[in-house]
Amino acid sequence: MQVYKLLSALLEYPNQELIDHLPELQDFVIQNQEIDQAERTALQEFLRYLQETHLTEQQADYVKTFDMTAENSLHLTHHLFGDDKNRGPALIDLGELYKDYGVEVVTNELPDYLPLILEFTAYLDDGEATVFLSDAKKVLGVLADNLTKAGSPYAALLSIVESRATLSKLAA
């Protein structure tokens, strides 16, 4: 499920490497069969934002959006538990799930960091990915709504992730 790797990369802090690979990312979005038309349009708009906005402006926007605004945090358990003591066991469980699948986390981020979750999701088959993400659907929806209200270009990416977390898609 390469689309999850793409979403993971796009939700990371923007850097020059990302900008350098925009042509390949645009080709991927156009050619990939697992991306529907609505997702394709949203992804193309986001890639256009990356192409047309200076990198330092993207970086400032990213920090303001995700690091300085708690309700936009990409650490999903933060939305469920805040700094409550119950957050720790949830993080441990998620880390253990990654290990159970043989995925070694090589980052300083907590296991609930959305780009890391999406990177893991890319290892799953389509049905498993939907079920896995469905556990976070409510948080993904709140995050997508928060970003939409803030007028963030990242809202479209969260809407794609939330849409893919819908269990009714499995019945279709």
Image: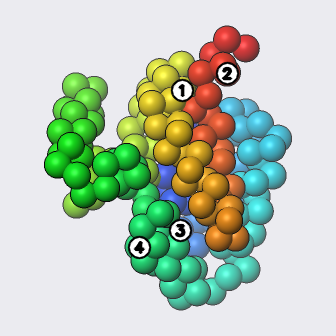
Earlier residue among tags 1 and 4 = 4
Tell me the SS state at disc 4: helix
Residue 130's label in the rendered image is: 1
Cβ atoms at labels 2 and 1 below 8 Å apart:
yes
State the quadrant of the N terminus: top right
Q: Which residue is mark 2?
A: 169
Q: Nearer the viewer, mark 1 or mark 3?
A: 1
Earlier residue among tags 2 and 3 = 3
Q: Nearer the viewer, residue 21 or 3?
A: 3
Q: Is residue 132 above or below residue 118?
A: above
- Callout 2 environment at 10 Å: few (<14), some (14 to 19), or many (20+)? few
Determine the CA span between mark 3 and mark 4.
19 Å
Cβ atoms at labels 3 and 4 below 8 Å apart:
no
Tell me the SS state at disc 3: helix
Amino acid carrying mark 2 in the image: Lys
Q: Is residue 162 left or right of residue 106?
A: right
Residue 113 appears anywhere in the view: no
Amino acid carrying mark 3 in the image: Leu
Q: Nearer the viewer, mark 2 or mark 3?
A: 2
Where is residue 5? Give x, y as percent: 50, 46
Query: Looking at the image, which residue is at 68% across and 82% down?
Result: 53
Amino acid carrying mark 1 in the image: Thr
Q: Is residue 88 above or below residue 108?
A: above
